[in-house]
């Protein structure tokens, strides 16, 4: 009976030591897990602080995206306006050419009417006048094209 009690006591002691060892191992694992958690938290706080310092004063992302969209829209509007301006300038040049052409025709017709009232060599004057009018129109067009090319 004593042997059985001793044997049982030793078995209990061995089981107790094993349980103590398991408890110690688990406490050790818990300690290292907490230490690792603290280290990670400290590292993340340092990273957050560094990023705060780096991006202090920066615009929030939604505001920056809105600004970017606005800039793109303004650039597109500018291109459209430049195209409209070029188109308007071309129309203005065409209108000026037409006005000068009509003005020259009017002067030519007034000159022709004055000459026809004279009745001296009316036929030759008419031919002469038509040739000069054509030459003037050609010269005007060439001058306008030359001025346009110089502007560009």
Image (cartoon, rainbow, N blue to C red):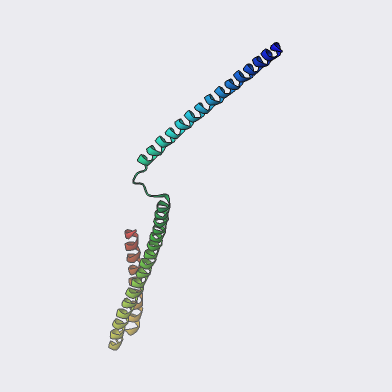
Residue in the foreground of this view, choosing between 22 and 47: 22
Q: Residue furthest top?
A: 3
Task: Kindly indicate the quadrant of the structure image that contains residue 98.
Answer: bottom left
The x, y position of residue 4, in whole percent, is: 71, 14
Compared to 53, does 64 lie above or below?
A: below
Q: Quadrant of the C terminus?
A: bottom left
The x, y position of residue 100, in whole percent, is: 32, 74
Q: Quadrant of the N terminus?
A: top right
Which residue corresponds to the image point at 34% horizontal and 62% vertical from the top-left? 148
Task: Kindly indicate the quadrant of the structure image that contains residue 26.
Answer: top right
Q: Residue furthest front?
A: 1
Residue in the foreground of this view, choosing between 68 and 9: 9
Task: Kindly indicate the quadrant of the structure image that contains residue 11.
Answer: top right
Q: How many marks?
A: 0
Compared to 122, does 134 lie above or below?
A: above
Which residue corresponds to the image point at 35% horizontal and 70% vertical from the top-left? 92
Residue in the foreground of this view, choosing between 123 and 70: 70
Compared to 41, does 58 lie above or below?
A: below
The x, y position of residue 3, in whole percent, is: 70, 11
């Amino acid at each position: 009976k004593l042997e059985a009690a001793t044997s049982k006591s030793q078995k209990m002691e061995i089981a107790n030591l094993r349980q103590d060892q398991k408890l110690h191992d688990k406490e050790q694992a818990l300690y290292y897990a907490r230490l690792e958690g603290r280290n990670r938290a400290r590292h993340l706080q340092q990273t957050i602080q560094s990023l705060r310092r780096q991006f202090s004063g920066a615009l929030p992302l939604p505001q920056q995206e809105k600004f970017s969209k606005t800039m793109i829209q303004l650039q597109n509007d500018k291109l459209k306006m430049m195209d409209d301006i070029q188109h308007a300038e071309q129309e203005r040049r065409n209108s000026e050419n037409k006005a000068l052409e009509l003005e020259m025709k009017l002067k030519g017709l007034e000159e022709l009417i004055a000459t026809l009232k004279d009745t001296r060599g009316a036929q030759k004057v008419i031919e002469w006048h038509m040739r000069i009018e054509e030459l003037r129109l050609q010269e005007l067009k060439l001058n306008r094209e030359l001025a346009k090319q110089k502007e560009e």
